[in-house]
Image (cartoon, rainbow, N blue to C red):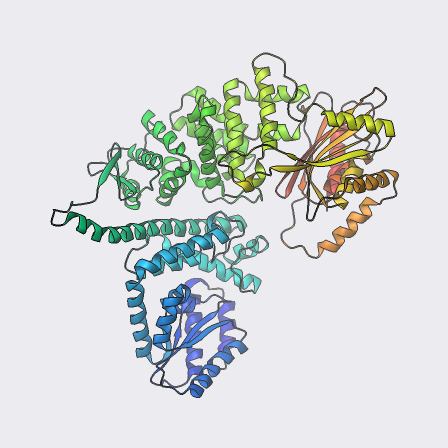
């Protein structure tokens, strides 16, 4: 009817949303399409399939339509009827997925194409011959149930492949609400499994989770005006506002919770499908083997722990278990399941959640031991933890967990939400327990190290207080509580110091030793540092970083043992090549450099290839000390599209004839191949002579690319003074968005302020640069505190966009 477009605009512009609006939009569309089809005629029906069939029309949804006919209508009349339907839809600017089939053709296509089959399972009569639609639905459901044994494994593999391509929605910062694991496609797959009558998904919370994702997609499509399912960062604040949520973090947490519910329901459902299909396949063989013998009654049960048995591939409660009288049974069942590599049965988790009396405070020793056993099971811990999480048992055991549950991390380095990162850190720590004397403290410390991220303030400082309280409630004695607090408070200390501070400065090692306090805590902190980085993401750990941390730990251990800090062993003492280049630079009076690849070290057997950059590109530059050396070299690298991954600046006096600046860089090409060393040297000479205007060249490139960039603006740079970090220099720390030419701009700012850079420690974490510069005045002395603070503010303003 002529008013459909206006009615649609009015409906989509109304403040009321959610399922009622989706249903009303579907009903409005039904009336319009029925009018286009014309008076009912026998043998012809218009059928909605897919999301439209479920009355789940989002603002930019496709219309999935099937023109069903019995084959008796002449071809020209059928074509004219289809044109009368399809063209007005296209004229409205709506996307259309259409087909014209007989019931027999629809069944045949469904048998050949699983996606078509899934869409037809949601077939709904819109107009025309209702009997024809009813017959098709009956035949399709009968076909689906008859072929379930072959089609369901195909559907499960389709879900797994989609998850491999799109990731897990519950952990993504920019997830696809439809395609990612735990998204709307998975919810639709669960409906298909239920329609097979072979298994059913756990219903609690599932429809609510699905409705949340649909509401989010509606708001996303209304906000962007596009048919998109990807929740991009730059749209999240507007989508959150449209849904009446506080901010983008609240939106992501809501989406993550919904996706977690759907993912867990999928895990349980597919496990049940596998169990039923295995039983079906085994039954004929069992009858053949037994012949006339009496068949065994009931499933086989294998004991796992007191009150816990294995049954059909799951950990379940024993028949005599009394969870209402045994508070520790929750942890004992979880630990037994994880240690056996089995999932915790849904019915068991629900029974434990319903009747378990809860642990006393402090926990008894058995509960604490079972908790540590659960955390030490490695990768098998994750599905068991998710089962406890789904039934609310984690927050019963650890009330402070609620603050980090499903909490997003807006950092490109992190691949997980806060809670999953904590569990993943415990998984990584389980492989390191042989390196420490107290594996229990390592595992629990790994689980709690970021617990402060749910509260305002520095998460390490806040987390220490929370972790101490949690450790005391778990029943750890006071000395262990102190160690746990130190682990959480200083879990970033080793990696930050090793990569951003000069380990040859005695103040650096002394400061770490004072903070750590004793060798046992240092040992635990070393293992926690590695586990935390490995659980963060591919950009957080490498063999190079690991060697720097190990060198720092060796030095601190020597100080804690009462001796002097040992000499450097990891890229701290000048190498023979550095000294050779310094001599050559002194002899020629100009820059010399080398560029080559080097192996960073072997991978561990379980280390994914994408987690470690095994081959690095090392650039060594030596030139007689002069103002502008650092900024000139950094600018030349930026012009040649070389990204600086790390850098160190040293001053050597190889022959006693004057200082030589040696810059050691680890670089990577943004794209293409590496430039020739000779070209780098020529441009470096030009930059030092002033004939190559680096700022102008970089500004020109930035202007050309600025219009192509999208997304949220990066937070402003922060420059601070790190007091007490060195006895011989002032440490200026810069945190900023990593960008081409950033190091050049920092170097220029320091040089223009009259600061002399004695060494620099550059590190890049995802999109963030965290750089530390050891600077002195012209006389080689640390800066006056007021002067240092002024320098920091001046540099901060210079770096501001």
Image height of 652 relative to 714, above or below: above
Whole-percent x and y of residue 345?
A: 30, 44
Which residue extends farthest top?
A: 562
For residue 263, above or below residue 26: above
Residue 641 in the image: above or below residue 17: above
In this rendering, position of residue 56 left or right of residue 563: left
Which residue is at a point 60% across and 39% down the rendered structure image?
A: 613
Q: Position of residue 276 (x, y in %)?
A: 27, 52
Give how far across and how far down residue 214 sits, in percent. Answer: 45, 60
Q: Is residue 27 above or below residue 259?
A: below
Whether residue 124 appears in this view of the structure is: no
Q: Please state if 251 lies on the left or on the right of 562 as rendered.
A: left
Seen from the viewer's position, the closer of residues 246 and 410 is 410
- Residue at horizontal 44 percent and vertical 31 percent from the top: 430
**x, y percentage for residue 477?**
40, 21
Depth check: give the residue in front, 75 or 396. 75
Q: Name the foreground residue: 674 vs 263.
A: 674
Residue 47 shows in this picture: yes
Q: How many marks?
A: 0
Indicate the quadrant where residue 76 lies: bottom left
């Amino acid at each position: 009817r002529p008013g459909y477009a206006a009615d649609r605009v009015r409906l989509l512009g109304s403040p009321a949303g959610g399922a009622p609006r989706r249903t009303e939009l579907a009903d409005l569309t039904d009336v319009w399409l029925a009018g286009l089809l014309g008076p009912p005629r026998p043998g012809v029906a218009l059928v909605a399939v897919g999301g439209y069939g479920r009355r789940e029309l989002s603002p930019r949804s496709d219309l999935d339509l099937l023109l069903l006919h019995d084959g008796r209508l002449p071809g020209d009349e059928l074509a004219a009827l289809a044109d009368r339907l399809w063209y007005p839809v296209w004229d409205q600017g709506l996307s259309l997925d259409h087909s014209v089939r007989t019931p027999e053709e629809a069944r045949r296509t469904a048998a050949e194409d699983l996606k078509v089959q899934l869409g037809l399972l949601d077939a709904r009569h819109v107009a025309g011959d209702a009997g024809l639609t009813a017959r098709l639905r009956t035949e399709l459901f009968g076909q689906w149930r008859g072929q379930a044994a072959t089609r369901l494994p195909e559907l499960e593999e389709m879900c797994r492949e989609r998850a491999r391509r799109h990731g897990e929605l519950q952990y993504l910062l920019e997830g696809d609400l439809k395609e990612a694991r735990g998204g709307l496609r998975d919810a639709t797959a669960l409906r298909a499994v239920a329609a097979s009558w072979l298994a059913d998904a756990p219903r609690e919370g599932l429809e609510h989770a699905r409705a949340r994702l649909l509401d989010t997609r509606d708001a996303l499509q209304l906000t962007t005006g596009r048919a998109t399912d990807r929740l991009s960062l730059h749209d999240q604040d507007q989508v959150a506002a449209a849904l009446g949520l506080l901010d983008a973090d609240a939106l992501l947490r809501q989406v993550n919770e919904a996706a977690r519910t759907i993912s867990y329901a999928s895990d349980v459902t597919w496990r049940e499908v596998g169990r039923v299909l295995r039983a079906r396949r085994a039954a004929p063989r069992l009858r053949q083997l037994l012949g006339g013998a009496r068949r065994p009654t009931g499933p086989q049960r294998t004991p796992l722990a007191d009150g816990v048995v294995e049954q059909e591939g799951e950990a379940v409660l024993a028949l005599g278990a009394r969870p209402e009288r045994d508070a520790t049974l929750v942890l004992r069942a979880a630990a037994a399941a994880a240690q056996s590599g089995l999932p915790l049965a849904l019915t068991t988790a629900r029974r434990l959640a319903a009747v378990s009396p809860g642990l006393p405070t402090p926990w008894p020793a058995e509960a604490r031991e079972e908790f540590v056993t659960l955390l030490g099971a490695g990768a098998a811990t994750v599905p068991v933890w998710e089962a406890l999480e789904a039934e609310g048992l984690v927050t019963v055991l650890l009330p402070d967990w609620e603050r980090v549950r499903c909490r997003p991390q807006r950092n490109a380095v992190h691949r997980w939400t806060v809670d999953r990162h904590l569990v993943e850190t415990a998984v990584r720590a389980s492989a390191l327990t042989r390196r420490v004397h107290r594996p229990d403290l390592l595992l629990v410390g790994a689980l709690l190290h970021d617990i402060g991220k749910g509260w305002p303030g520095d998460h390490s400082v806040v987390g220490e207080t929370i972790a101490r309280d949690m450790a005391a409630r778990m029943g750890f004695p006071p000395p262990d509580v102190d160690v746990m607090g130190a682990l959480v408070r200083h879990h970033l200390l080793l990696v930050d110091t090793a990569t951003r501070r000069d380990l040859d400065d005695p103040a650096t090692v002394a400061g770490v030793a004072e903070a750590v306090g004793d060798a046992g805590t240092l040992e635990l902190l070393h293992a926690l540092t590695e586990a935390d980085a490995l659980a963060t993401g591919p950009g957080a750990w490498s063999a190079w970083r690991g060697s720097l941390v190990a060198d720092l730990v060796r030095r601190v251990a020597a100080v804690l043992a009462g001796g002097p800090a040992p000499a450097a062993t990891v890229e701290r003492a000048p190498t023979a090549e550095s000294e050779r280049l310094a001599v050559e630079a002194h002899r020629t009076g100009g820059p010399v450099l080398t560029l080559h690849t080097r192996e960073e070290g072997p991978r561990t057997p379980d280390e994914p290839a994408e987690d470690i950059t095994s081959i690095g590109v090392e650039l060594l530059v030596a030139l007689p000390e002069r103002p502008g050396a650092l900024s000139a070299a950094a600018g030349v690298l930026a012009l040649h599209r070389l990204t600086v991954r790390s850098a160190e600046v040293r001053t050597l006096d190889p022959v006693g004839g004057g200082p030589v600046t040696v810059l050691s860089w680890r670089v990577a090409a943004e794209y293409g191949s590496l430039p020739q060393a000779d070209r780098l040297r020529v441009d470096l000479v030009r930059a030092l002579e002033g004939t190559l205007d680096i700022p102008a060249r970089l500004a020109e490139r930035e202007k050309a690319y600025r219009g192509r960039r999208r997304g949220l603006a990066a937070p402003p740079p922060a420059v601070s003074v790190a007091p007490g970090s060195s006895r011989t220099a002032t440490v200026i720390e810069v945190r900023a968005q990593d960008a081409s030419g950033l190091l050049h701009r920092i170097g220029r700012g320091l040089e223009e302020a009259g600061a002399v850079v004695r060494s620099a420690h550059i590190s890049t974490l995802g999109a963030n640069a965290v750089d530390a510069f050891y600077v002195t005045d012209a006389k080689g002395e640390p800066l006056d505190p007021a002067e240092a603070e002024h320098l920091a503010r001046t540099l901060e303003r210079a770096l501001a966009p």
